[in-house]
Amino acid sequence: MKLAEKNTVFYDGDCGFCKRSIQVILKKRKVDFYFLPLQSKTAKTILKKRGVKIELNTMYYLKNGILFQKSEAALQIARNLCFPYPSLFYLGKLVPRFLRDKVYDIVAQNRHRLHQQSCVLPTAEEKKFFIE
């Protein structure tokens, strides 16, 4: 399976809040997700080919060759998690994207304060979902 066909989450590898979010995705997933830190060479190559200038305060989600960013990425991910997370997708879609992205930006600006850097090691089973 090519990377573009996988459910790939690009995240800030130096962010404790982001790493904690990855742990939630791993525990609540209904489908397999793969993870790639934005600081990696692979992430830079993939996103550059899509004309994206990487911003570390932005989460990107690649699903079936379509790249989602910010709140839309979060909603698309929530859609593929166990209950109650899919309800966030449907509720979030009721809010205009520019407002959702404003809230996303506020959280992103404060992400280092929300959860300090932590070292959570993936289990042997979870390691296969980390591309780099």
Image (tube, rainbow, N blue to C red):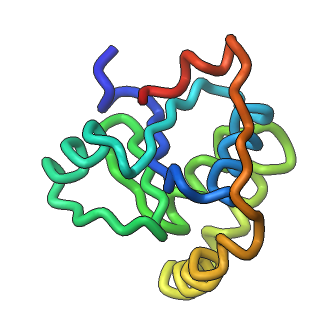
Residue nearer the viewer, 27 or 130 = 130
**Residue 2, how many percent across, how many down?**
29, 20
Residue extending furthest toward the right: 84
- Position of residue 97 relative to residue 44, above or below, is below
What residue sits 43% from the left and 55% below the top? 60
Tell whether 126 sits left or right of 129: right
**Nearest to the observer: residue 78 or residue 35:** 35
Q: How many marks?
A: 0
* x then y, percent, for residue 57: 48, 70
Q: Nearer the viewer, residue 35 or 95?
A: 35
Up the image or down, 45 lies above or below 18; here it is above
On the image, the x and y values in percent for residue 95 come to 62, 80
Q: Is residue 110 visible?
A: yes
In the image, residue 124 sits, relative to residue 62, either above or below, namely above
> On the rendered structure, is 56 left or right of 99?
left
> In x, y percent, where is residue 67?
34, 51
| Quadrant occupied by the C terminus | top left
Q: Is residue 101 left or right of residue 125?
A: left
Left or right: where does residue 35 sit relative to residue 119? left
121 shown above or below 15: above
In the image, what residue occupies the spot 71% across and 42% down? 119
Quadrant in the rendering for residue 123: top right
Q: Quadrant of residue 22?
A: top right
Q: Which image quadrant: the N terminus?
A: top left
Q: Residue at x 59, y 24 (%)?
A: 32
Q: Is residue 89 something that shows in the picture?
A: no
Residue at 65% over, 39% down: 80
